Image (spheres, helix red, strand yellow):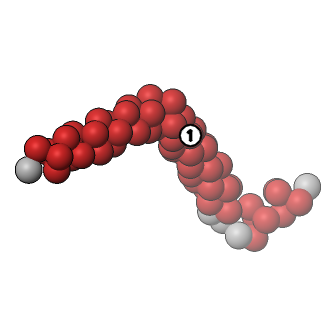
Amino acid sequence: MGNQYLNFFFPGTSLYNEKKRESLRIIEKKEEKVREMNDLLKRDIEPQMEKLRKVNFFLQNCIENLG
């Protein structure tokens, strides 16, 4: 009964509520994508970057020792 009362006296509230639910679904989907991307970063990209940093450090030391 409460929803009918609001819809009668405040037309558009059901449209507002539907848009709100739709927006919340979109936000949840986007948050899931962000979680997936963060997992990818932690699992694949960060370890590779650490390896490259070590190689870079090694090569810099080699260059310094040659010069």
Instruction: Write down the quadrant of residue 50 in the picture.
Output: top left
At a point 51% along the width and 30% down the height, the residue shown is 43
Q: Would residue 29 be found to the left or right of residue 37 on screen? A: right
Q: Would residue 20 be found to the left or right of residue 42 on screen? A: right
Q: Which amino acid type corresponds to the residue marked 1 in the rendered image?
A: Arg
Give the camera-side residue of 54 and 13: 54
Is residue 24 depicted above or below 13 in this figure? above
| Quadrant in the picture for the N terminus | bottom right
Q: How many marks?
A: 1
Give the camera-side residue of 31 and 15: 31
- Camera sees residue 30: yes
Q: Residue furthest right?
A: 1
Q: Would residue 57 be found to the left or right of residue 11 on screen? A: left
At a point 71% along the width and 70% down the height, the residue shown is 10
At a point 89% along the width and 60% down the height, the residue shown is 2
Give the camera-side residue of 4 and 44: 44
Instruction: Give residue 30's position: percent from left, percent from top.
Output: 51, 44
Instruction: Give residue 13's position: percent from left, percent from top.
Output: 68, 62
Instruction: Give residue 19's position: percent from left, percent from top.
Output: 58, 53
Q: Residue furthest left?
A: 67
Q: Residue furthest bottom?
A: 9
Q: Secondary structure at mark 1?
A: helix
Q: Would residue 13 be found to the left or right of residue 1 on screen? A: left
Instruction: Write down the quadrant of residue 62 in the picture.
Output: top left
Q: Which residue is mark 1?
A: 35
Q: Residues within 10 Å of mark 1 (few under 14, many from 20)?
A: few
